[in-house]
Image: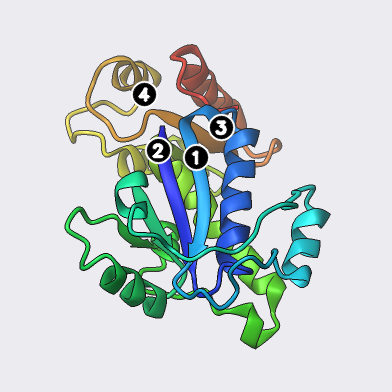
């Protein structure tokens, strides 16, 4: 099991949202047994308070119940108890590292880094009042983080117009060796024994009326038959 602690300033908006969104995404994918998520703040000013009402309402609209969650500050034993300490912004990252006297195991991360937005921050909606944007960015970060931690890759074939386009995506995202072929037999060999990146895959398919759609369906069937398709 991978234990994740999400951290923001006061633990009433961003980090509890990340805790519950991440847990909900893991549940939807049937991976709740593989992850444990919690949250905390670098400040104790909100200690004991519940999730801030505007964020709580947005979570409830998604069917996510955060009743009973109260804010707490990070504790000295959190560094050993959690595998990852995932922060919302640079200020929180700095405070977290100072609290633990550094980060010798490289556990302190920025959430949006997982979404390919290196160094970008999730603004505190307590100040911006833009809770919708904060939750949207938190969700994007949690989705990408869950994929990265579970070894799942998303293969976007929606813009592919021919077989060459499909195999270009597969080669790039799965990091095929140059000598692998560009056909279904080669794909089967990669999935069942040759070196590649990813352990499970989600495929974004071309439109059903696209000329390449029948072949893309064969590609998806190959992933399914190899037991590598996330449905």
Q: Earlier in the sequence, mark 4 or mark 2?
A: 2
Q: Write down the quadrant of residue 112 in the picture.
A: bottom left
Q: Write down the quadrant of residue 195 in the picture.
A: top left
Indicate the secondary structure of the residue bearing disc 2: strand
Q: Is residue 172 above or below residue 220?
A: below
Dot 1 surroundings within 10 Å: few (below 14), some, or many (20 or more)? some
**Foreground mark, 1 or 4?**
1
Marks 2/1: CA–CA distance: 6 Å
What residue is shown at x 31% (from left), y 53% (from top)?
A: 79
209 or 66, which is in the foreground? 66
Q: Is residue 67 above or below residue 188?
A: below
Indicate the secondary structure of the residue bearing disc 4: loop
Dot 2 surroundings within 10 Å: few (below 14), some, or many (20 or more)? few
Indicate the secondary structure of the residue bearing disc 3: helix
Dot 4 surroundings within 10 Å: few (below 14), some, or many (20 or more)? few
Q: Is residue 183 above or below residue 11?
A: above
Marks 2/3: CA–CA distance: 10 Å
Residue 36: image tag: 1
Q: Earlier in the sequence, mark 2 or mark 1?
A: 2
230 or 139, which is in the foreground? 139
């Amino acid at each position: 099991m991978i234990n994740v602690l999400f951290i923001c300033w006061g633990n009433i908006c961003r980090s509890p949202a990340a805790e519950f969104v991440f847990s909900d995404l893991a549940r939807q994918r049937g991976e709740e047994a593989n992850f444990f998520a919690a949250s905390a703040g670098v400040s104790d000013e909100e200690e004991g308070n519940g999730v801030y009402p505007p964020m709580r309402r947005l979570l409830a609209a998604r069917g996510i119940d955060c009743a009973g969650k109260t804010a707490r500050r990070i504790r000295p034993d959190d560094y050993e108890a959690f595998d990852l300490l995932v922060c919302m912004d640079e200020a929180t990252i700095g405070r977290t590292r100072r609290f633990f006297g550094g980060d010798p195991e490289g556990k302190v991360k920025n959430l949006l880094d997982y979404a390919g937005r290196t160094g970008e921050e999730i603004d505190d909606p307590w100040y911006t009042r833009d809770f919708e944007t904060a939750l949207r960015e938190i969700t994007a970060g949690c989705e990408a983080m869950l994929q990265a931690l579970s070894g799942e890759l998303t293969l976007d074939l929606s813009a592919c117009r021919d077989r060459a386009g499909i195999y270009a995506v597969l080669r790039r995202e799965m990091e095929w060796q140059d000598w692998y072929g560009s056909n279904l037999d080669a794909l089967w060999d990669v999935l069942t024994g040759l070196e590649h990146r990813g352990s499970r895959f989600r495929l974004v398919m071309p439109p059903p009326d696209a000329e390449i759609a029948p072949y893309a369906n064969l590609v998806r069937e190959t992933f399914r038959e190899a037991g590598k398709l996330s449905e």
